[in-house]
Image (cartoon, grey):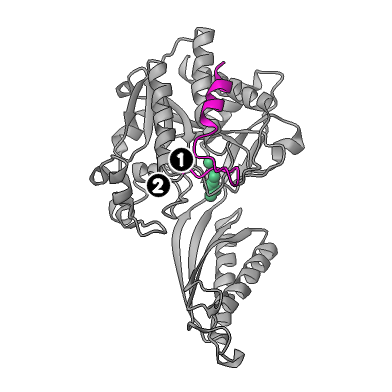
């Protein structure tokens, strides 16, 4: 099993010495280092390596042109100051599971692929799962070309700088048509497995979720000389909206988070002219999410009016509810259910994944590995070595069950 050495090799890549968290943003040097690592792992195993038109990386054992391929993998990019496991655990476990299969002398009857999807977190350009969305035709080329990072660099320029051709991006239905099943292993981003005492679980569904941008525009003015009564301060309406989001989410049994903000002119002694806040909200059902967003927007408009501030709300992305393929899920449960030491609970999640995007095109499934604290999108994200190894073995069992019979 090569899990430990692979894990140790990848661990320092893109880690901030200040925070201990990861800053592996799409098409930056850290991302390219991760991509070089992926390619090296593929080639060291004699797999056929390719980067597709959208910058996703693939490593193949057997010829995918035969069709009905079984694919596993995840992503290597991170959120700002993310943890080590969200994404990389799935990719490293995929290579380790392949090594395990080879060690068992398993004979493949279907092509087997390992994938690293590009820009899953959307940390740089604001939209999550860009690589899989493009491939599945859920993001138009025009919209992708318009994506711009916080420094004003567009996605095409960022891809170009990294040596990829941005004019080649677009839907890839032929590639997806060759895949019979995609299984993504991921660290759990909650405590369900910790509470149930299980190492590994199977995903049932992903909550509908989206990102909304709230632009509060007021008037810049002097922080020392402008009477309170004369101000049009967008920070006030923004702050009240943050509290409204919490209230609406609590009432509905949903979640709502303002986790990113941009302020102009961003001076300590200036009343802001603009406060731009990004809202991430998720709920078990679509109608609940609609109610939450409607409630937050209504409150934001009232607060904006109260403070003489203009408000524009833009939905930047949305992913509907995902129900993972029942037949594939049952197949995973059957395969893993034969292992008496491994109970496999089935759980839903509020986190988004490439497997969710692809589920509209091909049968997909997910395995979760226990996270003892449930913390994720933070340097404190964790999983024990024993649980990671249990995940690798579970994935190897699944791949053997799907691709070797
Ligand atoms: C990705 O991890 C997301 O759920 O935002
Ligand atoms: Mn994530
Ligand atoms: Mn992830």
Cβ at disc 2 under 8 Å from ligand 1:
no
Q: Residue at x 45, y 10 (%)?
A: 107
Vertical comparison of 144 with 293: above or below: above
Tell me the residue at 43%/53% (across/down). 127
User: From the viewer's perspective, is the residue at label 2 or at label 1 nearer?
Assistant: 2
Mark before the other along the chain sequence, 2 or 1:
2
**Which residue is at the far top?**
105
Element carrying mark 2: helix
Q: Is residue 254 magenta?
A: no
Which residue carries the number 1 mark? 359
- Residue in view at x 60 percent, y 46 percent: 19
- Vertical side of 93 occupied by 268: above or below: below
Q: Please say if the residues under marks 2 and 1 sit with CB atoms less than 8 Å apart.
A: no
In the image, residue 251 lies at what x, y percent?
69, 65
**Image quadrant assignment for residue 161:** top left
**What is the distance, in whole Å, between disc 2 and disc 1 at their CAs?**
15 Å
Label drawn at residue 130: 2
Residue 15 in the magenta stretch? The answer is: yes
Judge from the rendering whether residue 25 lies leftward or rightward of residue 195; answer left or right: left
Disc 2: CA contacts within 10 A as few (<14), some (14-19) or many (>=20): many
Q: Is residue 34 left or right of residue 165?
A: right
* Percent x, y of residue 258: 58, 62
Count residues near mark 1 (Cα–Cα under 10 Å), then give few for <14, some for 14-19, many for 20+.
some
Give residue 263's position: percent from left, percent from top: 50, 70
The magenta-colored residue range is: 1-24
Q: Main secondary structure of the magenta part?
A: loop
Task: Answer left or right for 145 relative to 348.
Answer: left
> In which quadrant will I find the N terminus?
top right
- Residue 318 on image: x %, y %: 47, 56
Quarter of image, res 349: top right
Residue 390's place in the image compared with 209, above or below, is: above
């Amino acid at each position: 099993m090569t899990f430990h050495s692979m894990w140790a090799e990848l661990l320092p890549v893109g880690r901030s010495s200040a925070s201990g968290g990861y800053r592996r943003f799409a098409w930056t040097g850290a991302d390219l280092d991760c991509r070089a690592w992926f390619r090296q792992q593929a080639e060291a195993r004699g797999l056929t390596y390719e980067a597709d038109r959208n910058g996703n990386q693939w490593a193949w054992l057997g010829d995918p042109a035969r069709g009905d391929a079984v694919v596993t993998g995840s992503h290597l990019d991170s959120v700002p100051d993310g943890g080590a496991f969200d994404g990389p655990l799935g990719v490293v476990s995929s290579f380790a599971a392949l090594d395990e299969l080879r060690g068992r002398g398993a004979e493949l009857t279907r092509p087997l692929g390992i994938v690293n999807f590009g820009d899953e977190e959307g940390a740089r350009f604001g939209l999550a799962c860009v690589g899989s969305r493009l491939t599945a035709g859920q993001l138009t080329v025009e919209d992708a070309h318009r994506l711009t990072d916080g420094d004003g660099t567009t996605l095409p320029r960022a891809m170009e700088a990294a040596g990829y051709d941005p004019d080649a991006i677009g839907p890839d239905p032929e590639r997806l048509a060759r895949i019979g099943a995609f299984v993504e292993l991921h660290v759990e981003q909650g405590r369900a497995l910790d509470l149930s005492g299980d190492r590994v679980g199977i995903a049932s569904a992903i909550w509908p979720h989206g990102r909304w941008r709230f632009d509060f525009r007021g008037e810049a003015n002097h922080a020392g000389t402008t009477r309170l009564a004369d101000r049009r301060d967008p920070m006030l309406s923004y702050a009240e909206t943050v509290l409204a989001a919490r209230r609406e989410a609590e009432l509905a049994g949903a979640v709502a988070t303002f986790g990113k903000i941009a302020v102009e002119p961003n001076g300590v002694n200036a009343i802001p002219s603009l406060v731009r806040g990004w809202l991430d909200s998720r709920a078990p059902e679509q109608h609940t999410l609609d109610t939450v967003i409607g409630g937050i927007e209504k409150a934001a408009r009232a607060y904006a009016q109260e403070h003489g501030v203009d408000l524009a709300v833009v939905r930047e992305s949305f992913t509907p509810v995902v129900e993972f393929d029942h037949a594939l899920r049952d197949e995973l449960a059957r395969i893993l259910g034969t292992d008496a030491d491994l109970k496999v609970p089935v759980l839903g999640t509020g986190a988004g994944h490439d497997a969710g995007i692809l589920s509209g095109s091909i049968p997909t499934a997910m395995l979760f590995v226990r996270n003892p604290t449930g913390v994720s999108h933070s340097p404190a994200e964790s999983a024990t070595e024993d649980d990671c190894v249990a995940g690798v073995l579970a994935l190897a069992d699944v791949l053997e069950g799907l691709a070797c019979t």
